[in-house]
Each structure stands twice: as C-alpha cells, then as structure tokens.
Image: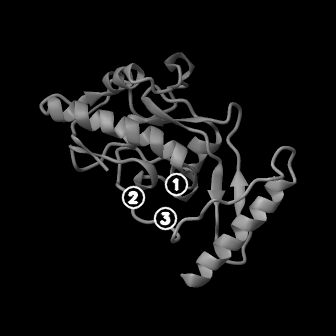
Amino acid sequence: MTHAEIHARRQARTYLDVLRALPGWAHAYIASTGPELGTRESRHVVTRRRLDRDHVLHGLRDPDAVAVGAWPVEYHPGAGVPSTWQYIADGGTYDIPLPALASADTANLFAAGRLLDGELGAAASLRVMGTSFGTGHAAGVAAARTSTHPATPARTQEVRTELQRQDARLPDLHLASGRSGLSQDQSYQGSTAV
C-alpha cells in the first residue's frame, strides 16, 4: 500500500507539471493529497437492471432515467499496464435508469456510486464522483419517497418530479430512445439508499 501511495503522489506531481504548461496555470500547486488511497472497485448491490459498457459508450437514453453519466470508461488494469479511456458517443452522456439503483431482492434498498451494479466497463464510468452525486441524489429521493409510502412502490416519474423540484439536471424524456428492458411505469418498493 505504501508503494502505491508513493506512486500516486508522483503521478499527481506529473499531472501538475502538465497543467503548469497550460496558459494560466503556471502558478498552480497541489494544496494536499488524500491521506490514503481509496478502493476503486469492491462489491456491488445487485440491482434490477445491470448497466454494461455498451450502454455507457453508446450514450443510451432511457425513459426511466433519474441521473446522467458523463465520465468515459476509465480502466486501470494494474501496475505497469497503461490505463485506457473510452469516450461516450455523440453528446458524451448516458442515462442512468431507476432500475439500475433499485436492489433486485431487497425492496427498500437503493444504491449509488461505485456500489451500482455495472459490469467492469460500466462500473469504470459509474463510480466517479460527479456521477455518484447524481445517483446518490436519485437513490435518496427514491428511498425517501418509498419510506413515506411503503405500500406503494416509487415510480420513475415521481422520482424525476421530485429531483426536478430540487433542481437536479435530468435528460429530456422526449430524447429517450426506449432501448431499456423496462417500461417507464416500472415501479420499486424501497426506502434505503446506500
């Protein structure tokens, strides 16, 4: 672990050198680094819809969207092996549907961030902070909605309406391609966000 932390700090200084070469960045500096490395990949909640690399890379639209992802598939295979970045087609975003946040077997559990059920390629985009903000917000709204109405499952439109009331930025549904496996009327019982 110590070796990895030393390597990561060297990498940060290399990135800083690159940034300093850009106009307006000559005096940039690193204020601090994290005290320890975080875990990039661990366990995932098995959800009602598992996202895959194609969903991300093709920028798929979905009528059940409650969040948006924009980060490329960022894969770090290991020490000494170059990292790869695969970028999202067209507008550079993909929709994240409510079923991708809802646990497959626990009615009151919603997931967000790196806990989402995505195969390796999708997880390499889903886990980043910006996307985690969006999925966390949506999971929290879905869980709150379900906790106040436990007998009535949360529906995508109810979650979207509350997210929009809270100024979340969501894709326009008229742009959705409908290439998802569930309908917009699919509902979920639940009350916990993780």
Horizontal relation, residue 99 to residue 92: left or right:
left
Displayed quadrant of residue 65 = top left
For label 2, count other residues whose C-alpha is less than 10 Å away and answer few (under 14), some (14-19) or many (20+): some
Where is mark 2, residue-wise? Answer: 44
Q: Quadrant of the N terminus?
A: bottom right
Mark 1 lies on residue: 123
Q: CA distance from mark 2 to mark 3?
A: 9 Å
- Name the element at disc 3: loop
Percent of width and height locating residue 47: 35, 48
Coloration mode = one colour
Mark 1 or mark 3: name the one nearer the start of the chain: 3
Residue in the picture at 35% in, 44% down: 48
Q: Looking at the image, do the residues carrying marks 1 and 2 touch, with CB atoms under 8 Å apart? A: yes
Residue labelled with disc 3: 41
**Which numbered tag is attached to residue 109?**
none
Residue neighbourhood size for the residue with mark 3, other residues' Cα within 10 Å, grouped as few (<14), some (14–19), many (≥20) = few
Taking 91 as reference, is 164 left or right? Answer: left
Residue in view at x 24 percent, y 34 percent:
144
Which amino acid lies under the numbered mark 1 shown in the image of this protein?
Ala
Q: Is residue 24 above or below residue 42?
A: above
Q: Position of residue 92 (x, y in %)?
A: 67, 36
